[in-house]
Each structure stands twice: as C-alpha cells, then as structure tokens.
C-alpha cells in the first residue's frame, strides 16, 4: 500500500514538473514574440523617423539652397550659381525644344520651370547668344537694385560702351518690356551724354527713366526718334541731323562729335535699333552697339553699313 502511494506521489511530481516547464517555455516564447514585435515596432518607428528626418533634411537643403541664391548674389551683384544643384525632384526637365537648352538645363538644375522667364528674354537669347548669362540669371537678379557707378567706364576720354543687358540696369522696366530688350535708345544717349557732358550720373537707367517721364518711350517699339533730337537737347547736348554720306560722317567724327544712328535690319538688328558712331580710325568707322560686344570691337567700312543707316544725329556741346 505504501509502495503504491509513493508511486502515485512520484507520478504527480513528474506531472507538476512537466506543467511548470511547459509554462516557462510558453512564457519564454511569448516574451520572445513580444520582444521581436517591440523591436520591429521600434525599427518601424525609427525608419519612419529617419524618413521624416530625410524629408526634413531635403527640405532644409532646398530651403538652404534657395536662401543661398540670395547670398551667392553678393552686394555688388556678382553671381555664381555653379554650386547650386536641383533638390526639387518634382520639377521635370522641360522637353520644349522651342526654348533654348541653356534655359531648360538651368531651370532644372535650380528647381525652376521655364515659365520663370518672359518670352521676350527667351527670344533675346535665341537671337543674341552672348546674352546667355544675363538671361539665365533673370529669376534671381530681376528684383535686385544696384548703386550704379560708371566712373571706371573711361567716359573722360572716349564714348564709353554701355550694354542694354548690363545687369545693373538691364532688368529695369522700360515701357512694356525692360531696358535689355527695348532700351537701346536711352543706352545710346547715355553713352554720348556721359562723354560730352562729362556727367557719370547720366547712366542708362537714369536716361531710361528720363525717357519715360518725358514721353519718349514707345511701348512695344522701344523709343521715339525724338528721344535723341529733343531729349538730347533737354539733357544739354547740341543735336543736329546729318546726311547719310561718308563725307558728312567722317567730318563729324573727326571733329569729336559722336553720331547716334537709327538702323534697320542687317548686321545690328532684326528690326530697328539705335547705335553710336564714335570714331574714324584708319579709314573705318568705330561703332558702339549697345546690344553687341562683338560689333563694338570691330571697325566698319562705310560701304558695309551705308544701307542700314536710317537716321543720323550728330551730337556736340
């Protein structure tokens, strides 16, 4: 009897041990599952946060790059956008082949669209490739103001060359466009005034404002001819029309009197344009073209420009 009782007790103890071991195992499995679940949750949370951080970082970079554009354009207007990359992946590269590749590439690299450029500047770059830097920088420089100083232009000794698309005044509104496109008249008059009157305050922007104030600006076409022969007189010049012949032109230039000319289609323009004949050197005419450095660096035979000259005004003091 005692032996049977002892056997039953041992059996009960074995069962209890088995139950305890089973409970411990189940608890361990449950804890392991919980730990794995917690770790996975933590990983998911961290990944989510990392993604958020990446998004914030991208946003910060984008914001920084945008703010850097203002800083890269320093107080003197010097600009270098070569280090700025496109962080706005939502802006696709334009496939509009009617727009110059340079504009499309620049827009993509800076997170812009080609709509940031007015059609007049797009056309300007197509016609005059040398204006590329001026045209490309339009979205970033169009609202900048400059303390214009032309004292280093050499105006004391010769008629200085001013370009319509100089960033210091080229983006300034003139009529329904800007000086870069429509301001050849004021720019030419500025060249002559600064030289003959020895007055560096009469820069192209100042003369363009004068032209608009006095009604010489012709929206859609540029400037009325009267800007030269009337406006020039108001500013202090003596302005006289002269004949379009080589003898008359040479006579005025050798006397030190620059000649502002209106020209038609040809070497200087597709439509109408003002230029300045500034000197007569070795039997050829030197020209300041406010829209072209290349045209201004060469000497011209009268026979090459004779049939492009429409109106000529000799200026003196």
Image (tube, rainbow, N blue to C red):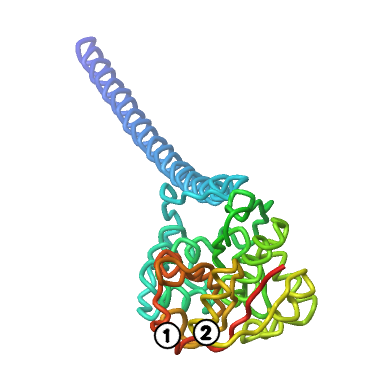
Name which residue lies at 63% across and 62% down: 169
The dot on residue 266 is 1
- Is 146 placed above or below 36 here? below
Tally of numbered tags: 2
- Say above or below: 29 vs 147: above
Relative placement, left or right, of 24 versus 274 is left
Q: Nearer the viewer, residue 31 or 4?
A: 31
Query: What element does badge 1 sit on?
Result: loop
Residue 171 or residue 83, whichever sits in front = 171
Q: Residue tagged by mark 2? A: 263
Residue 264 appears anywhere in the view: yes
Residue under the point 70% across and 57% down: 198
Discs 2, 1 touching: Cβ within 8 Å = yes
**Residue that extends furthest to the top in the rendered view of this protein:** 2
Q: In the image, residue 103 lies at what x, y percent?
A: 42, 68
Label 2 SS: strand
Give the answer, above or below, for where 228 lies relative to 134: below
- Evaluate whether residue 116 shows in this view: no
How far across and down, in percent of the image, does residue 54 sit? 45, 45
Q: Is residue 151 left or right of residue 206?
A: left
Residue at screen point 44% across, 50% down:
84
**Vertical placement of 116 versus 221: above or below?**
above
The picture places residue 166, in percent across and down from the top left corner, at 56, 61
User: Which image quarter holds the C terminus?
Assistant: bottom right
How far across and down, in percent of the image, does residue 180 sit?
57, 70
């Amino acid at each position: 009897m005692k032996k049977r009782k002892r056997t039953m007790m041992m059996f009960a103890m074995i069962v209890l041990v088995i139950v305890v071991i089973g409970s411990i195992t189940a608890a361990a499995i449950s804890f392991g599952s919980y730990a794995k679940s917690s770790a996975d949750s933590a990983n998911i949370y961290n990944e989510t946060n990392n993604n958020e951080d990446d998004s914030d970082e991208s946003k910060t970079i984008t914001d920084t790059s945008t703010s850097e554009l203002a800083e890269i354009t320093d107080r003197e207007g010097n600009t270098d956008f070569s280090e700025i990359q496109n962080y706005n992946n939502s802006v696709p590269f334009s496939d509009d082949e009617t727009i110059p590749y340079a504009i499309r590439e620049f827009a993509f690299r800076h997170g812009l669209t080609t709509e940031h450029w007015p059609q007049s500047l797009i056309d300007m770059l197509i016609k005059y490739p040398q204006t590329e830097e001026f045209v490309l920088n339009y979205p970033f420089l169009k609202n900048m103001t400059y303390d214009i100083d032309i004292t280093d232009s050499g105006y004391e000794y010769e008629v200085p060359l001013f370009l319509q698309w100089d960033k210091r005044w080229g983006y300034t509104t003139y009529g329904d466009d800007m000086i870069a496109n429509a301001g050849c008249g004021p720019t030419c008059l500025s060249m002559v005034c600064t030289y003959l009157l020895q007055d560096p305050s009469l820069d192209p922007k100042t003369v363009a404002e004068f032209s608009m104030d006095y009604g010489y600006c012709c929206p859609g076409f540029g400037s009325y001819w009267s800007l030269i022969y009337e406006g020039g007189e108001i500013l202090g010049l003596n302005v006289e029309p002269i004949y379009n012949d080589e003898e008359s032109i040479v006579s005025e230039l050798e006397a030190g009197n620059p000649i502002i000319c209106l020209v038609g289609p040809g070497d200087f323009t597709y439509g109408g344009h003002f230029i300045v004949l500034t000197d007569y050197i070795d039997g050829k005419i030197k020209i300041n073209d406010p829209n072209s450095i290349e045209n201004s660096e060469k000497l011209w035979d009268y026979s090459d420009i004779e049939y492009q000259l429409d109106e000529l005004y000799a200026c003196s003091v």
